[in-house]
Amino acid sequence: MIKATDEKCTNMTISLTVEVLTSSGCSRCQRAKALAKEVIAELDDDRLQYREIYVVEEIDYAVGLGLLSAPAIALNGELVFPYLPSALKLRKAILERLE
Amino acid sequence: MIRIGEAATVSGISTDTLRYYEKIELITNVQRNDIGVRLYSDKDLSRLRFIKRAQKMRFSLNEIGQLLEFRENPQAARSRVQKLARNKLEETVHHLEELTRLRDELHLLTNLCRASDQGCPILDGLAGNDEPR
């Protein structure tokens, strides 16, 4: 019984939300969205979730992250890439957090 | 002793405000000459400097009135002054946090606006624009 609860807790902790912070009139934002979706699809892991954040609509959250420009990518509420990363770097950062 | 015009120049407080301070008793016992003209003493000017400093520290006129009373008897008023100053400090910290937040928001929004190749996201956000992002 205890083991089952523990397993459930562990699974909950290692789920990861990839948040792409975007803005209008930002061509690189489209690239950031496509990149995040591609990497998530490649990894094909149920623990991964994708979320788009339109900065102007969630300005409090964006400021709380320390965001200064768009696009940017946050992983579980941490601003890991305040710029458009390469696919390699994004994949590595996601995998590190899922381990 | 100087007249109100000179007191206004020296203190940087307008004559209307000086009269108002007298009316609400921030400045009391301002002397008058034979024909009723106000005459400000060094002590009055010192009080005015104190009021101005306190205003810069964002004390309200009501609070400044209390501070001036405390000033007359500093030893007896020590704990009350500390309490008033502590409250003001807490207010200031809160205000500073709000200002910092506002600064960060504006910083972000101006960066987004600068980087945008069509229009400005700030205006889009206000207008509730549904165009592709």
Image (cartoon, grey):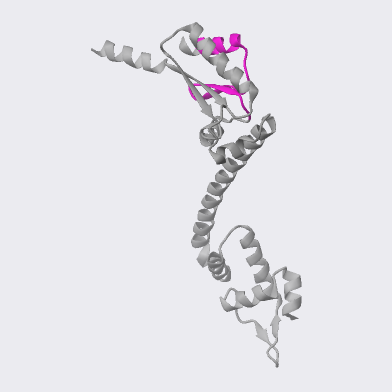
- State the extent of the magenta-drawn residues as a range: A69-96
Q: Is residue A83 visible?
A: no
Measuring from the top left, give residue A10's x and y in whole percent.
37, 14
Q: Is residue A93 magenta?
A: yes
Measuring from the top left, give residue B121's x and y in whole percent.
61, 35
The residue located at (60%, 22%) in the rendering is A29
Residue farthest toward the bottom in the current orientation of the protein: B34
The residue located at (49%, 7%) in the rendering is A43
| Horizontal relation, residue B105 to residue B77: left or right | right
The residue located at (66%, 31%) in the rendering is B118
Total tally of numbered discs in the picture: 0
Residue B113 sits in quarter: top right
The quadrant the C terminus of chain B occupies is top right
Residue farthest toward the front in the current orientation of the protein: B131
Residue A67 drawn above or below residue B104:
above
| Horizontal relation, residue A6 to residue B11: left or right | left
Q: Is residue A85 visible?
A: yes
Q: Is residue B16 magenta?
A: no
